[in-house]
Structures are given as C-alpha cells and as structure tokens.
Amino acid sequence: MIEIKTTQLVSQLATDIQDILDIAQLNSGDLFVLGCSTSEIVGGHIGKDSNLTVGTLVIKTLQEKLTPLGIGLAVQGCEHINRSLVVERSLALKNQLDIVTVVPALHAGGACSIAAFKQFDNPVEVEHVTAAAGIDIGDTAIGMHVKFVQVPIRPTYTEIGGAHVTALRSRPKYVGGPRANYDLSKI
C-alpha cells in the first residue's frame, strides 16, 4: 500500500476534472460518469483493497466541481453489481433511467459507490447511463456509459496515487459523404 496525501489527491483530481470540463465543454444538464477503484489509488489491486475514506474524498471533490455547473454525476459500480451506477433520483426520473434494486457494498459496488450513496440527497442505482464525458481512475472501463462517439482526453495527471487515469468525452457523429461540410464557419 502507498500513503495517500489528502491534499494531493484532491488537488490532482480537481485539476483532472477541470481539464476534462475545459476540453469536453459540458453544459448544465449534461451527465458525467465516474469509474474509480480506490483499491488502485491506494496501491492495491482493483476490488481487493477498497478504501471508503478515499472514496468519500473523490465523490466530494467531484460534487464540488460539477454541482455548481449543473452537471449530473453518475458513479459506476464494479462488475459485482453489473456496473450499475449511483445517481440522484431526480436525475434518474428526468432522464427516464432504469432504476434497479441494489445497494453498493465495499466489495460489491465499491467505495465510491458507497460514498455517493451517503453524500447524494436521494440516491438510486440505475442500470445504464449515456454520459457526455467521464473519468476512469484505476482502469474500471467506463466506455459503456459514455455517449458514442468517444474521444480520449489526456488529463494533466495520468496517475492518482497508484491508479492509472484516463478520460473520455463525446462528440456528435460525422454523417454524410465526400461533399458534406463539418465546419460551422463555412455556412
């Protein structure tokens, strides 16, 4: 295990989230997905060393960045709960998301899912979301929850603690043929 400094974790995560927000150009009402292995952050193996303290910090940091912008947060659980996600009930109802019955546990859902359940106002689990962007801390595979077409983002910090960090944004599909125009300035 590695020692995680709280201030460093929060600072690095906040920087990476801001990088994603700057590049993805999200709007109020958009959805942001988090996939996170706190086990990997603390230098352990995914699913084996879950850390609720780290999960709590991750969720708090994300909420502080996203909530003022009106961006919804969806927190992906692990494969033991079929990668279902914690969201606010109001978000699930507004977006007609399929609510499922499960409550995350430390080794069946993960520390970030538990932290989201504790920190959200009225949390529910949903089966699937289609987010505009997201961050993957610890190689948890968030791609199934990010809108097609997905574009990788390289945030400032590619490691937080012992966890590898990647991110995705989405863009509208290009449609048409050889005469199609994709540049709004040419209209």
Image (cartoon, helix red, strand yellow):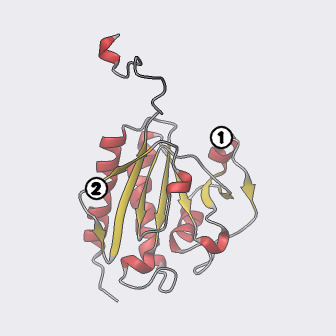
Res 99 quadrant in image:
bottom right
Outermost residue toward the right in this view: 101
Position of 166 with respect to 141 (left or right) is left
In the picture of the structure, the residue carrying the numbered disc 1 is: 95
Q: Is 16 placed above or below 6 here? A: above
Which three-letter amino acid code belongs to the residue tagged 2?
Pro
Q: Nearer the viewer, residue 171 or 24?
A: 171
Question: Distance from label 1 to label 2 (Cα)?
Answer: 28 Å
Position of 52 with respect to 94 (left or right) is left
Which three-letter amino acid code belongs to the residue tagged 1?
Asn
> Which residue lies at the image location 31% right of the left edge and 70% below the top edge?
160
Outermost residue toward the front in this view: 178
> Which residue lies at the image location 40% right of the left edge and 78% below the top edge?
40
Position of 44 with respect to 108 (left or right) is left
Q: Residue 123 appears at what percent x and percent y?
A: 64, 58
Q: Residue 74 appears at what percent x and percent y?
A: 55, 54
Q: Is 24 placed above or below 61 here? A: above
> Which residue lies at the image location 73% right of the left edge and 51% below the top edge?
98
